Amino acid sequence: MSTSAEIVVCGAGMAGLAVAYQLAVRHRMPGVVLVDEREPLTLTSDKGTQGYRNWWPGPDDTMLRYMTRSLDLLEEMAEESGNVFRLNRRGYVFLTGDEEGVERLRSTARDVSAFGMGALREHLRLDEYAAAPAEGYRDQPIGADLLIGDAARRAFSGVAGDLKAALHVRRAGWMNAIALGAWLLKRAVGSGATFLRDRVDGFDVEGGRLRGVRFASGRRIATERVVIAAGPALPRVARLLDVDLPLFHELHAKVTLRDTLGIVDRRSPFLIWTDPVSLTWSADERASLARDGSTRRLLEPFPGGIHVRPIDGPHGDELYLIWTYDVEEREFIWPPRFDPHYGDVTIRGSAFMFPGMSAYFGRADARVDGGFYCKTRENRPLAGPLPVEGAYVLGALSGFGIMGAHAGADLVAAHVTGSALPDYARWFLPARYEDEAYRAEMERWGALVGQL
């Protein structure tokens, strides 16, 4: 069976939904077909912590400008929808119990402020610091507040008593990503887009130009334009076009835990402990872990970066915990397999931020899930045309797809429709890797740029 479409969007995660919304709703393009072998938002888009931030520590202002555009779009959609996806502005708070960590937070915040995040304000007392409301995003400050010593300890109750400083990034928070995705899909379909449940099996290309998309069901759609927004499946789908993209995968997990003892204030921002830690084990546990080569590493120091935030789960007392201490490259397989120690390790790590969390050590009911980050080496998305005429990509959103897909979709839609592009658009083109000077800059920057 063969049909035709003006454009086919491959992938119905947040990236694909954002593209379909931009094309069908904002650019009023007819004949948009969105296709996925799964139900929308069920691969990785529903597995993250659903946070957002305009905090991007370099190496320049490119990602901050990109993300600022994405957050502007999110707020526009919140206004249009009546904030159906509960965008809040609680903020991200980076915590340190180390004197050197105070200067590290201050220095990094000054850099990001210079990139355009907003002003950095320092507080030794709480009288000029405005705590964030639990709900809503309007009329809130931007920039960041650096709370020192007692001001930090008073602002964030329950945090470790040796807390030296807290950096509160203000244009940040979280949302309900499933509600956002459902709204994007509803708006796109209401503007004429179609959702098709099928698996992309191949592309028809003649003379270097796209002519159609083939599916596992035997269906074929004749089209001269396609956007590949396939999340972690992006490398596989791009290879169907004989295009190899410079991508790799990391497996990232999170823990959902019931905080039945109320250790973490339900009104808290997104809290991140930045100091390295060494986990606390009993003598018997240490001996047992040391005997096994696969667990011996749990006795070694761990990097900082433990994340904790409250969520509105079915019981009203749930927390998300996430700790990216393993960034090895992985093959994308589904369903993913997680380290059996991840839940216990992450709960133990969270006790360095909230000592009361030690009451939950050994909790068997902690749930671990997650998904794959699909990344470029410099941790910037791909958004724009591919070498095959008529083919475009939005991907490599590397764990920030919920917040960053919207600026990327904005760029892709502009490429597709011939609309004006912002000057930063060139830094997200797949063709940027053909520039030798850019590749040299990537080597200088190093890995994990912008990752928390």
Image (cartoon, rainbow, N blue to C red):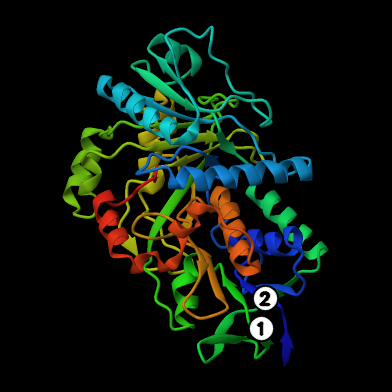
In the figure, 404 relative to 396: above or below? above
Going from N to C along the chain, the mark reached first, 2 or 1, is 2
Label ID, residue 156: none
Answer yes or no: do the residues labelled 2 and 1 have beta carbons within 8 Å?
yes
- The reply to whether residue 381 is visible in this rendering is no
Q: Residue at x 63, y 63 (%)?
A: 413
Q: SS of the residue at dot 2?
A: strand
Q: In the image shown, does 169 or 62 lie closer to the viewer?
A: 62
Q: Nearer the viewer, residue 223 or 347?
A: 223
Spatial CA span between label 2 and label 1: 6 Å
Tell me if 281 is positioned left or right of 169 in this view.
left
Residue 227 at x, y percent in the picture: 59, 71
Instruction: Name which residue lies at 39% across and 14% down.
Output: 148
Q: Quadrant of residue 375?
A: bottom left
Task: Give the x, y percent position of residue 153.
Answer: 43, 14
The disc label shown at residue 7, or none: 2
Q: Dot 1 lies on which element? A: loop
Which residue type does callout 2 highlight?
Ile
Position above or below: 12 against 180: below
As drawn, the label of residue 223 is 1
